Image (spheres, rainbow, N blue to C red):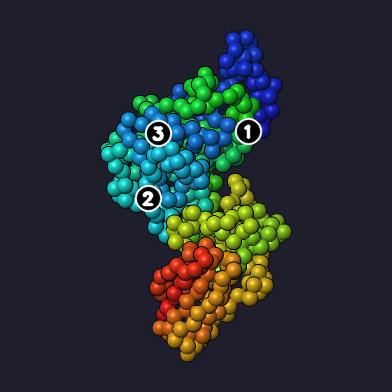
Amino acid sequence: MARQALLASLDEGWADPARLYREGRRARLLLDAAREAAAEAVGCRPDELVFTPSGTRAVHEGVAGALAGRRRAGRRLTVSAVEHSAVLHSAAAHQGAGGVVDEVGVDRTGAVAAAGFAAALRPDTALAALQSANHEVGTVQPVEEVAEACRAAGVPLFVDAAQSLAWGPVPGPWSLLAGSAHKWGGPAGVGLLVVRKGVRFAPQGPADERESGRAAGFENIPAIVAAAASLRAVRAEAAAEAARLRELTARIRARVPELVPDVEVVGDPENRLPHLVTFSCLYVDGETVLHELDRAGFSVSSGSSCTSSTLTPSHVLRAMGVVSEGNVRVSLPLGVAAAEVDRFLEVLPGVVRGVRETLGAPVAGPAGSAEAVTVDALGMTCPQPVIELARAMSSVQIGGTVTVIADDEVAAVDIPAWCFTQGHAYEGSAPGRDGATSYVVRRAK
């Protein structure tokens, strides 16, 4: 349906919709129809929704415009610690311009507590931001409860709904919302921004008459029409497809720990998106795991810090306090066959086993006799410091300690997380010389 709409609108929607000649009026009709269809799916008025060149641009324009419109109320922005980087980049820009950013933490599933978020609101809070569901682990956030708390406090709530719009509208009295068409199977290069009536909003940048002044530039009408058509088509089958995909992701969540030892499945097991499942494998290099899975025909991604493209730990996994090494994020596409999931479960154990053998992953053994051991992991990168810690643990007695000296930033995330998954006690860390840090672990079993 989306492809047909795109092809048809290439012929009918090429003209400037702001012009009064015949072709312009025809283009305007297509744009207005797409806006109405998208607004119906989102659950807002058509005149509250504008199209943007991307979901990222919708986030940036929405956050900046809402903060500017509420400047007299204050310069404080409240966000969750696991927001998409687009939101956090907007927050950093606000902070760089003299604003204040309050970050609300999450539990080990990646969810904020509604009461905790409400407690973070201040009299000078101009805007709050909370995603509808997390993009890395799939955990659904308590947007409705937070939106009610924000309304009671007189603070508008901005919702990044990119991950969830395919499955249904976002509940609650939120004030602003952003989405991205490629997340629901539409064309890339189309985002949407909703600003509810009554929300103070001041568009930033040079004035532009298009899209209510909130998204500058000529509208890509063929892509917009295709985006609206694809959202309508996805929504028509959302309930049935969500139930089917939820069964498949539940199968992955249950089977992966059975098939692969030393794996932590992350994210909320129940309150989650139906198509996403994420797990972290100890003692592996995430980049190699992803490469080997790609060779086997599986296109997965990662929030892992153990890849060449990420120099710092995933901010989501770090905020959750879970293992980041060897992280695999599986996003099941609409219509995926159950047989493909079964084949993935057949291939994964051999891939992880092969990477662990290459890296020399430790094998569990009886407790040793040493009271304390120090491991020099300076210059080692993820996952090697944790591998060296696990090896050394076999040489100390129960109650003994292992001190790991490392300068890899990821160790600050993965060593405490390793202790949690293995049942040992993390005693803390202390800074050393030349960027090194000492991490102390006590053997508990």
- Taking the spot 69% from the left edge, 21% from the top edge, the residue there is 11
* Viewer-nearest of discs 3 and 1: 3
- Judging by the rendered image, the residue that carries numbered circle 1 is 2
- Taking the spot 69% from the left edge, 57% from the top edge, the residue there is 294
Q: Does the residue at mark 3 contact the one at mark 1 (Cβ under 8 Å)?
A: no
The quadrant in which residue 75 appears is top left
Amino acid at the residue labelled 2: Val
Graded by Cα atoms within 10 Å as few (under 14), some (14 to 19) or many (20 or more), the crowding at tag 3 reads many
Graded by Cα atoms within 10 Å as few (under 14), some (14 to 19) or many (20 or more), the crowding at tag 2 reads many
* Viewer-nearest of discs 2 and 3: 3
Q: Nearer the viewer, residue 281 or 337?
A: 281
Q: Residue furthest bottom?
A: 369
Q: Does the residue at mark 2 contact the one at mark 3 (Cβ under 8 Å)?
A: no
- Judging by the rendered image, the residue that carries numbered circle 3 is 67
- Judging by the rendered image, the residue that carries numbered circle 2 is 104
Q: Position of residue 253 (x, y in %)?
A: 52, 61
